[in-house]
Image (tube, grey):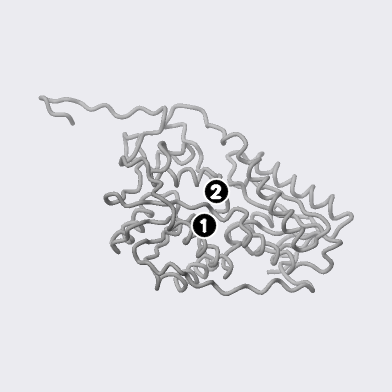
């Protein structure tokens, strides 16, 4: 990939005199117990995802049943993976979300699908996902009283800080004269479907973007301290916003930040995302015309994320059942269920 092809004034994806921390090898599991199964949830594709899944399968599949569902908002895809694990006669299901943040519409929908949240998340309730005439969203079906545990996403785990610091140091020459900008993509949600509810599109929950920005700000400061950078900053892009003006506003805010900082400091930009394949093109486009060095790698693949999954499995396997709601599915609040019609005393 050339600078001209990227259309940026200046962009480098790697290099620098400072070596990144050497990745540790995945720590062996101490819970060699086939009575629980692990479901990894993610979304995306490409070589990075495949390499990450290969590493996790190699590390964990010999020890306990393991499955992956790659479309985290689709109950059919998740159900297939859950059925695979239930077929292995597991006694507990540990669900691990490979999402960038625990506070997101996607995470709320995941909680609903596994019976931890009572109602479906409105952002994922669309006519395209429902049978004609019905206003109900199905949950994942769990056999009997199988306990279900849903862990947190990576968020600001120390291993995440370690990975992002190594990404920044690969770009660095003199940290004490460099500014780091950590860029994340606001948690994605499907557009609210007013054709079902007969309502105007609902805004995202208040404070959600602020919370995500606070997460990035905290991460950026910890990276600054770990790498001894001069300054650290956070920026959030909105590539999934319904209105183009919202997307452009956030892109311009990032460009303005980078331009202002570059007047006095050498600029380093690092992506906060599970894989670079999704985030890098979006961030690259937003940085058009700026002078900086950009690392386009995400958290995956990386041996340290395999270690994070191992630690998360240990914690999750020890947690009690989180499943509260065991109905097959619920209508979204505000919708009307189809009325049954009685013919000769038989309800149809």
Image coordinates for residue 228, horizontal then vertical, percent: 80, 62
Where residue 271 is drawn, which disc sits there? none
Image coordinates for residue 99, horizontal then vertical, percent: 53, 54
Looking at the rendering, which quadrant does residue 204 occupy? top right
Return the residue nearer the eye: 155 or 279. Answer: 155
Image coordinates for residue 94, horizontal then vertical, percent: 41, 56
Instruction: Give the residue furthest to the right.
Output: 264
Image coordinates for residue 162, horizontal then vertical, percent: 66, 64
Task: Measure the alpha-carbon separation of dots 2 and 1.
Answer: 10 Å
Left or right? Give the position of 201 relative to 321: right
Q: Quadrant of the N terminus?
A: bottom right
Q: Residue at x 52, y 52 (%)?
A: 152
Q: Mark 1: give few (<14), some (14-19) or many (20+) Cα within 10 Å.
A: many
Q: Residue at x 57, y 47 (%)?
A: 187
Left or right? Give the position of 148 relative to 230: left
Return the residue nearer the eye: 248 or 25. Answer: 25
Q: Which residue is mark 1?
A: 98
Q: Element type at marker 2?
A: loop
Q: Mark 2: give few (<14), some (14-19) or many (20+) Cα within 10 Å.
A: some
Q: Which residue is mark 2?
A: 102
């Amino acid at each position: 990939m050339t600078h001209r092809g990227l259309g940026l004034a200046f962009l480098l994806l790697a290099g620098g005199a400072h070596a990144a921390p050497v990745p540790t090898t995945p720590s062996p599991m101490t819970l060699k117990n086939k009575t629980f199964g692990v479901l990894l949830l993610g979304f995306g594709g490409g070589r990075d995802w495949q390499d990450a899944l290969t590493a996790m399968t190699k590390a964990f599949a010999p020890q306990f049943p393991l499955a992956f569902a790659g479309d985290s908002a689709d109950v059919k895809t998740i159900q297939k993976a859950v059925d695979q694990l239930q077929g292995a006669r597991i006694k507990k299901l540990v669900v691990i979300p490979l999402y960038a943040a625990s506070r997101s519409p996607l995470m709320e929908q995941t909680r609903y699908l596994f019976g931890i949240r009572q109602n479906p998340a409105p952002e994922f309730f669309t006519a395209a996902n429902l049978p004609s005439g019905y206003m109900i969203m199905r949950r994942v079906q769990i056999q009997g009283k199988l306990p279900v545990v849903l862990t947190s996403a990576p968020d600001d785990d120390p291993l995440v800080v370690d990975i992002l610091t190594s990404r920044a140091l690969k770009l660095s020459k003199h940290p004490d004269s460099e500014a780091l900008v950590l860029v994340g993509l606001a948690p994605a949600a499907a557009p609210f479907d007013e054709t079902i509810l007969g309502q105007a599109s609902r805004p995202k929950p208040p404070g959600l973007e602020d919370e995500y920005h606070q997460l990035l700000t905290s991460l950026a400061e910890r990276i600054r301290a770990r790498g001894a950078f001069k300054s650290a900053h956070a920026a959030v892009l909105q590539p999934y916003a319904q209105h183009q003006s919202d997307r452009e506003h956030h892109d311009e805010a990032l460009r303005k930040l980078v331009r202002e900082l570059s007047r006095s400091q050498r600029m380093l930009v690092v992506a906060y995302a599970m894989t670079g394949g999704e985030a890098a093109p979006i961030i690259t486009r937003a940085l058009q015309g700026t002078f900086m060095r950009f690392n386009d790698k995400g958290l995956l693949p990386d041996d340290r994320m395999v270690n994070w999954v191992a630690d998360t499995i240990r914690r999750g396997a020890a947690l009690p059942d989180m499943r509260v709601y065991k109905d097959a599915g619920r209508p979204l609040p505000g919708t009307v269920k189809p009325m049954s019609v009685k013919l000769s005393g038989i309800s149809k």
